[in-house]
Image (spheres, helix red, strand yellow):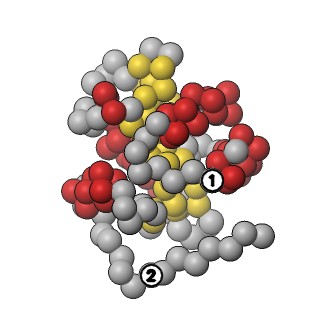
Amino acid sequence: MNKYKIREMNLNDYLKVFDLWSNTEGMGLSDSDSEESISKFLKRNAGHSFVCTDREEIIGTILCGHDGRRGFLYHVAISKEYRKNGIGKRLVESALDSLKKSGIIKCHLMVLGNNKIGNQYWNNAGWIKRDDILIFSKDT
């Protein structure tokens, strides 16, 4: 497992990261995932998003940021052939540790309702599914 390296995500990773997201079942992508949008996110949330690499190949990602009160995880993705190796757990730990260092003590994440693999993963990882919160979205 130590042959896989976790490091901070940077904009130079974008094409490989977007390719991984595009090939991950259950991943919801939108205009908010453009290179420009991800660049803004990474700048605003420096030090919180990570990739996992096997040599030069990006095999895992996590986008993480906060609003000053709560942390948020997005686009946790592991290449199918690398799953079940603890990579997701290491990425989440890296993100949560970075939030703690910023004084953020609670984190949320969103999973599409029909993403069976994602829902099962987060449930098994000890995250609590909230049924008391609804999310409303609107394009600006």
| Residue closer to the observer: 51 or 68 | 51
Question: Can residue 7 be seen from the camera position used here?
Answer: yes
Q: Which residue is located at x 37 percent, y 61 percent? A: 114
Identify the amino acid type marked 2: Ile
The C terminus - image quarter: bottom right
Q: Which residue is located at x 41 percent, y 51 percent? A: 26
The N terminus - image quarter: top left
Q: Which mark is residue 133?
A: 2
Identify the amino acid type marked 1: Ser
Q: CA distance from mark 1 to mark 2?
A: 22 Å
**In the drawing, does residue 97 fall left or right of residue 86?**
right
x then y, percent, for residue 113: 38, 66
Above or below for 46 versus 103 = above
x then y, percent, for residue 59: 43, 28
| Residue closer to the observer: 56 or 106 | 56
**Residue position marked by numbered label 1 in the rendering:** 30
Above or below for 95 versus 83 = below
Could you tell me which secondary element the residue under label 2 belongs to?
loop
Q: Residues within 10 Å of mark 1 (few under 14, many from 20)?
A: few
